Image (spheres, helix red, strand yellow):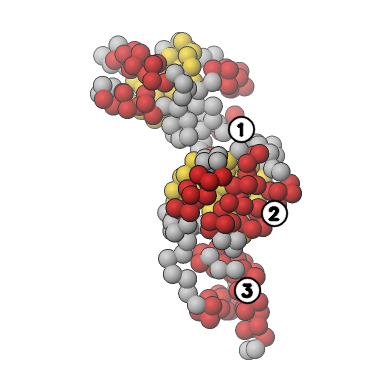
């Protein structure tokens, strides 16, 4: 009987986020294929479990060579668990070539869902979550980055990016140039870890903050999509006044409308204040 290929999500920071199914799979697997075996050994030590079977490396430089051997072991009846350093394998991590090889061989495949940095950053952003796209790491070179972001300027879905800490300020500035200084965004760092932080605001404000503070750690950037068609300022003011009359706080309403429709929050707030004073 064939075994199983299991794609297992690991904690992105806090080991307490690992599921009971994850720990059981790691302890009982015939093979654990890890992006970095040292990271996986440390995770097992922190979780106080013992890894079962063979621990082998599966990364971008050896995946093409290792994948067929792992599929053969699954077909021979063994359980192979695939993990990345953090989060779900295949999402900006190795595993895709192994997965496609397993599908082609009709090998049984399962998933152990769990922590996900893109989804956590999206939830923290305060931006629309009904439609979104994960874009991974932007290109490193300035010209390629500018071109890639320009292609996304008209995207209406919320956009999620990863970025290295030493490039985050430059990337945010490139986003200002591609998306506009008032486009709402958020920067989350060290999600689930001790120094977790999320900053929200217009891209220009976030770019200035990143240049001054030089944030460190694992970073995710979430950017609002371009509004399909922003209502006129008068319509937004009228909606804001209606919501304020219903008991909502003016600043909260303005922040929500500005983020939803991609309009300058300062200008909208001033118009709302002026309209209230004219009543």
Q: Nearer the viewer, mark 2 or mark 3?
A: 2
Q: Residue at x 60, y 74 (%)?
A: 268
Q: Is residue 9 left or right of residue 4?
A: right
Nearer the observer, 145 or 76: 145
Query: Circle 2 sits in a helix, a strand or a loop, which is it?
Result: helix
Q: Looking at the image, which is closer to me, 176 or 105?
A: 176
Q: Is residue 152 above or below residue 161?
A: below
Q: Nearer the viewer, residue 31 or 185?
A: 185
Given residues 279 and 206, the one toward you in this image is 206
Rendered residue at 56%/75% (across/down):
240
Drawn side of residue 112 relative to residue 277, left or right: left
Confirm or deny contact between disc 1 and disc 3 (CB under 8 A): no
Residue 125 showing in the rendered view: no
Residue 72 visible? The answer is: yes
Q: Are marks 2 and 3 in contact (CB under 8 Å)?
A: no
Q: Position of residue 156 (x, y in %)?
A: 43, 58
Task: Give the secondary structure at mark 3.
Answer: helix
Q: Disc 2 designates what residue? A: 208
Residue 85 lies, in percent from the top left, at 54, 27
Which mark's residue is nearer the viewer, 1 or 2? 2
Question: Which residue reaches farthest bottom?
Answer: 279
Q: Which residue is mark 1?
A: 14
Q: Position of residue 73 (x, y in %)?
A: 34, 12
Instruction: Please name the residue that numbered disc 3 is placed on.
Output: 267
């Amino acid at each position: 009987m064939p075994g199983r290929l299991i794609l297992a999500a690991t904690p992105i920071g806090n080991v307490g986020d690992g599921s009971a199914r994850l720990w059981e799979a790691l302890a009982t697997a015939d093979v654990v294929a890890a992006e970095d075996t040292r990271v996986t050994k440390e995770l097992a030590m922190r979780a106080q479990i013992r890894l079962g079977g063979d621990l082998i490396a599966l990364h971008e430089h050896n995946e093409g060579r290792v994948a067929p051997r792992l599929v053969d072991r699954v077909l021979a009846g063994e359980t192979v668990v695939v993990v990345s350093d953090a989060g779900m394998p295949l999402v900006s991590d190795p595993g895709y070539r192994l997965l496609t090889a397993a599908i082609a061989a009709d090998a049984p495949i399962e998933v152990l869902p769990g922590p996900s940095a893109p989804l956590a950053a999206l939830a923290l952003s305060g931006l629309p979550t009904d439609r979104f796209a994960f874009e991974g790491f932007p290109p490193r070179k300035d010209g390629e980055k500018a071109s890639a972001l320009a292609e996304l300027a008209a995207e209406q879905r919320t956009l999620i990016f990863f970025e290295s800490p030493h490039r985050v300020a430059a990337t945010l500035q490139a986003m200002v140039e591609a998306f506009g200084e008032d486009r709402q965004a958020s920067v989350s760092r060290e999600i689930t870890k001790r120094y977790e932080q999320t900053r929200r605001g217009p891209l220009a404000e976030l770019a200035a903050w990143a240049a001054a503070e030089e944030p460190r750690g694992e970073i995710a950037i979430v950017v609002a999509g371009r509004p399909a068609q922003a209502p006129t300022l008068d319509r937004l003011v009228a909606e804001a006044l209606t919501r304020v009359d219903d008991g909502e706080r003016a600043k909260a309403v303005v922040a929500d409308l500005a983020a939803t429709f991609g309009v300058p929050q300062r200008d909208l707030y001033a118009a709302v204040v002026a309209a209230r004073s004219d009543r």
